[in-house]
Image (cartoon, rainbow, N blue to C red):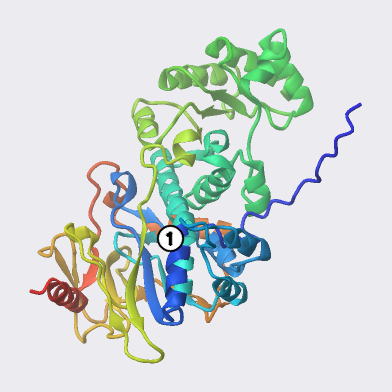
């Protein structure tokens, strides 16, 4: 008899514990340097933003803020974190960090102001998704986690929105857990995909943690566990008569549809009905058309046809153009892993510093690549609204505000591309308070509300913004007086 002790399972709360060491080591080495130099309490402003839309698209959905809030709420260095850091040694074998620094980390409590664009908002390159203001050492220590959380979830939410756009009025299910980038990747992907518009997930833990509807029927192994396909379908119908969408391509797809119909008649006789069939291989356009003919001829016009098999937005669009008769799209690998672009590429840059209550000193990062030159200031994003569509976004410095009169938006990638917004145009400033002096002041909406925000927000942009190929470029850029100030600062930094 096996007498080994099996540990009790641990409740899975992804960010409800100390994860302060979820960071790059250089964040800690810089923090140590700030402490040594007495710079730790200097006030700093950092912005997190991205420089280019993913998937060569025309929009991005902000996602991950609620997860980041949870991480920040629990941000502290626990005793075992400090024990680990105390055991690190330098090249000479001496402790890497002084005891005094570790004591400083032990007593440190998060005290920054954080402003952010709500999840589900459509955003554009160079717009700050998050602005962090507070002690330099704290701003630095939270960088890596913020980027990891927001980059990935924004990437997957955007992918999901593209898939949902391709599917039109059809339902989309997320089936990506088994191919996701680890456990956290799977959970984050399911959450972000729901924000992006999918209707349900196969990920049961995501359903529990986030309240996402869960969907699923059976795999090929179920069919193969019986002597015949008919026996497998009949057994499943006995077990789950209200969940009968049969996977029909284990042996012969169209014969499988006919078997599903036979079992469907048995279900109907017992007071139930055939929910549908799932196609997971082959020529999905041809097979869906033929399956629809069989289902209709056999008296099951209400039965849905579900398709899976390595789908993405462009393949879905192509299948619909080919006349595929598919009601539900199960999208897995290419959604959960953002298959054709592995990262969003968001960055986190210092924009201003000051000592005590003095004036801010604006900072700019130079680069030989103009697109990588950061924007100085304490930034906000103003979105101007038309009656039915959004008009333009202007990044501006809240310290100086916007000039009186019209607002001129300059595209930093091409300064001849400018848009003038008449004074009096309705607007919304997108970044809202999240933390003040380390205290949470924001009530995150339910995930279903965030999903609805993404859907309604996308609908207010010119349809060409959602186009897959050569999307329309929405006017989003830097307000002209800030652009001119940035240019002057860059020239001075270069000695020109």
Residue 236 vertical placement versus 62 (above, below): above
Q: Is residue 491 left or right of residue 428?
A: left
* Nearer-the-camera pick, 225 or 27: 27
Residue 105 vertical placement versus 171 (above, below): below
Residue 72 vertical placement versus 147 (above, below): below
Give the quadrant of the C terminus: bottom left
Residue 481 in percent (x, y) is at: 18, 79
Residue 38 in percent (x, y) is at: 44, 81
Residue 333 in percent (x, y) is at: 48, 34
Q: Is residue 381 left or right of residue 436?
A: left
Q: Residue at image x 54%, y 39%?
A: 173
Residue furthest front in the image: 92
Give the quadrant of the N terminus: top right
Evaluate whether residue 120 shows in this view. Answer: no
* Nearer-the-camera pick, 374 or 395: 374
Residue furthest right in the image: 1
Residue 75 in percent (x, y) is at: 58, 67
| Numbered-mark total | 1
Q: Quadrant location of residue 55?
A: top left
Q: Residue at image x 66%, y 61%?
A: 80
Q: Quadrant location of residue 216?
A: top right
Residue 173 vertical placement versus 43 (above, below): above
Q: Quadrant location of residue 419?
A: bottom left
Q: Is residue 464 left or right of residue 142?
A: left
Per the image, label 1 sits on a secondary structure element best described as helix
* Nearer-the-camera pick, 219 or 155: 155
Evaluate whether residue 263 shows in this view. Answer: yes
Mark 1 highlights which residue? 26
Q: Residue at image x 38%, y 26%?
A: 323
């Amino acid at each position: 008899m096996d007498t080994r002790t099996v540990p009790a399972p641990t409740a899975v709360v992804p960010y409800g514990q100390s994860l302060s060491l979820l960071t790059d080591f250089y964040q800690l080495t810089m923090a140590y340097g700030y402490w040594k130099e007495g710079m730790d309490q200097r006030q700093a402003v950092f912005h997190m933003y991205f420089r280019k839309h993913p998937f060569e698209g025309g929009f991005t959905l902000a996602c991950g803020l609620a997860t980041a809030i949870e991480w920040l709420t629990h941000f502290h260095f626990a005793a075992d974190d400090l024990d680990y850091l105390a055991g690190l040694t330098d090249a000479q074998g001496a402790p890497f960090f002084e005891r005094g620094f570790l004591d400083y980390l032990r007593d440190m409590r998060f005290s920054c102001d954080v402003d952010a664009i709500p999840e589900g908002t459509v955003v554009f390159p160079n717009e700050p998704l998050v602005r962090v203001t507070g002690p330099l050492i704290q701003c630095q220590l939270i960088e890596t986690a913020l980027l990891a959380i927001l980059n990935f979830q924004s990437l997957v939410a955007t992918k999901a929105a593209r898939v949902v756009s391709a599917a039109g009025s059809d339902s989309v299910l997320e089936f990506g857990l088994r191919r996701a980038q680890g456990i956290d990747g799977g959970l984050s992907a399911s959450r972000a995909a729901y924000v992006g518009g999918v209707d349900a997930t196969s990920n049961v833990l995501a359903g529990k943690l986030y309240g996402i509807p869960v969907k699923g029927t059976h795999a090929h192994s179920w069919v193969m566990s019986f002597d015949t396909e008919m026996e497998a379908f009949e057994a499943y119908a006995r077990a789950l008569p209200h969940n009968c969408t049969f996977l029909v391509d284990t042996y012969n797809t169209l014969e499988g549809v006919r078997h599903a119909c036979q079992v469907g008649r048995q279900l109907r006789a017992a007071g139930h009905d055939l929910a549908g069939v799932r196609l997971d291989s082959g020529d999905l356009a041809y097979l869906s058309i033929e399956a629809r003919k069989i289902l209709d001829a056999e008296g099951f016009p209400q039965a849905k046809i579900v398709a899976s098999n390595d789908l993405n937005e462009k393949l879905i669009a192509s299948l619909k153009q080919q006349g595929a008769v598919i009601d539900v799209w199960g999208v897995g690998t290419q959604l959960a892993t953002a298959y054709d672009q592995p990262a969003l590429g968001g960055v986190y840059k210092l924009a201003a510093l000051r000592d005590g209550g003095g004036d801010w000193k604006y900072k700019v990062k130079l680069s030989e690549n103009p697109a990588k030159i950061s924007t100085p200031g304490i930034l906000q994003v103003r979105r101007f609204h038309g009656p039915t569509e959004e008009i333009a976004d202007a990044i501006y410095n809240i310290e100086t505000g916007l000039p009186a009169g019209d607002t001129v938006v300059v595209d930093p990638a091409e300064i001849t591309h400018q848009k003038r917004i008449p004074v009096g145009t309705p607007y919304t400033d997108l970044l809202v308070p999240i933390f003040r002096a380390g205290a949470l002041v924001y009530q995150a909406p339910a995930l279903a509300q965030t999903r609805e925000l993404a859907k309604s927000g996308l609908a207010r942009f010119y349809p060409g913004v959602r186009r897959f190929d050569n999307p329309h470029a929405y006017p989003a850029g830097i307000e002209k007086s800030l652009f001119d100030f940035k240019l002057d600062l860059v020239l001075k930094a270069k000695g020109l």
